[in-house]
Structures are given as C-alpha cells and as structure tokens.
Amino acid sequence: MIPHLKELMASSHKQIVILSAGMQRSGSTWLYNATRLLLLNSPLTREITGYGWIGDLSKLPMKRIMLLKIHDFSQTVLDLVLPDIILYSYRDVRDTLASMKRIWHHEPSLELADRLIWSDQEWRRHAHFILRYESMMNDKPGALIQLITMLQFNDAIDVQKICNAIEELKYEGSRNNKAPYDMVNLLYEGHITDGRHGSWKGELNDSLLEQIESKYREWFIQNDYPL
C-alpha cells in the first residue's frame, strides 16, 4: 500500500520522512529536486519542509517533513530515519559506470557494478515510487505527473513550470567549504555529462562489458536494456 502525503499529515503529528534514493548518475538529483520543488510550491507543505543530503542530516533544520537524498542502500539508515515514503531512480548500469568515470574518475569495475546492482535490488524491495532514468529523459513532464499522482498532490500544479525550474537549477557553490555539492539542489559542478543511453560505448572496455553483461544478463533483460 502506497502512503499518501496528505493522509500521513492528517493521521498523526509525527515527522514525515521522504527518502529520495537513486543509483548514482540515474537522475536521482532530478527526482530529489522535483520532489523538493513540489513540496515548496504547495501552500500545505512549503513552510514545513526541510531537505538535503542524508550525510548532512545533523546540520539540517528539522521540519515536519524531511526530504533526504541518498544513494547506496543501507538498512542502518532505514532503521534510523524510519522513512514514510521512499522514491527510487535507476539507470542502465553500464551508463552509470561510464558517467561515474566521467564526473568523478571512478574506474569502472565488476565490483562497482556488483555494488550498484545489489543496491538497486534492495531499494526496489522498499520503494513506493520507481523512476527509470531513460523514461524521465524522454518525458520529464510525464515523469513529474507520475510523481504528483503518487504523492497525491491535489493542488493545481503547473507541471511545465516545475520542469523548467528544475532545468534552470545549477551549481552555485557548496555554501559549505567542506561540501563539493550545492547544499540546496545537491548539484555538483559539471553535474551533467552525457545523458544518452549507450554512453558507455568507448568508455568501458570490452572485457569488462562482457563480464557485466554475462553476470547480470537477467537484470538487463528484466529492465529491457539491450545486450
């Protein structure tokens, strides 16, 4: 059963935690900012919403609704924050590896693919809303409408205006000397690299591709990613 935001707000006075999870480089920052802007644009929630990266939780102002972004699955985190709603985004793991290499110089490996897919499978077991990166890239208004429907926002929402606002977001400095990301929108400098499906071609070597595609053949088939 999917918990709806207004029902949660009406049923008790406890803090409501929304986890915006996602495979690295899978549109997870888009999903986080879409949710953040929806909450901030609603008269019902704008004054009672706090948000940020899970690692900064101790520094964030505590509000009735807390939107927290996270990547790797952690049962410890779930037990700590007790999320009411979990959002999750995923991407072709080959593109994820290539994108991580471009932005952070992380060397692609089978071990990194193992971690990403294990985390993906765990998040899917808990998520209330799952966003496919490639679908979001092809139809951002449609992805936003799906999110609005899941959260049951009844306010009149200008979907294109929210999508445009997300597109206009940019890294404006960490506002914290120790953080490499913008503390509000969680964008990194040079955050967007190559959003195409198949961007791994020329980035991952053939031997590694063969290992990943062989080991996770069923994962690719189940998610309709061509081999």
Image (spheres, rainbow, N blue to C red):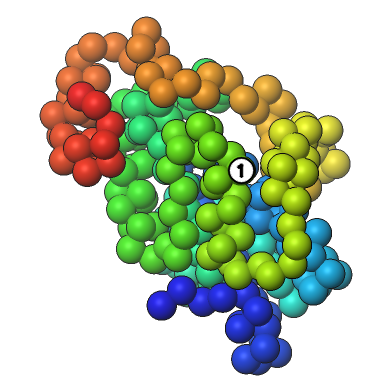
Q: Which residue is mark 1?
A: 141
Q: Going by the picture, which residue comes out furthest to the bottom?
A: 12
**Vertical arrangement, residue 69 with respect to residue 3, above or below:** above
Which residue is nearer to you in this view: 33 or 182?
A: 33
Q: Is residue 145 left or right of residue 110?
A: right
Q: Which quadrant of the view contains residue 185?
A: top right
Residue 113, image x and y in percent?
31, 34
Tag 1: amino acid: Pro
98 relative position to 183: left or right? left
Q: Residue at x 82, y 33 (%)?
A: 173
Residue 101 location, x and y as percent? 47, 21
The answer to whether residue 163 is above or below residue 126 is above
Identify which residue is drawn at 75% across, 37% down: 164
Q: Is residue 181 above or below residue 57?
A: above
When the figure is inspected, residue 30 is found, relative to residue 68, above or below; the finding is: above
111 vs 10, left or right, is left
Q: Quadrant of the N terminus?
A: bottom left
Query: Local crowd at mark 1 within 10 Å, few (<14), some, or many (≥20)?
Result: some
Relative side of 160 to 99, left or right: right
Q: Quadrant of residue 201?
A: top left
Q: Residue at x 35, y 57 (%)?
A: 124
Q: Does any portion of residue 30 appear in the rendered image?
A: yes
Which quarter of the rendering shows the C terminus?
A: top left
Foreground residue among 227 and 73: 227
Image quadrant where residue 13 sits: bottom right
The residue nearer to you, when weighing 203 against 195, is 195
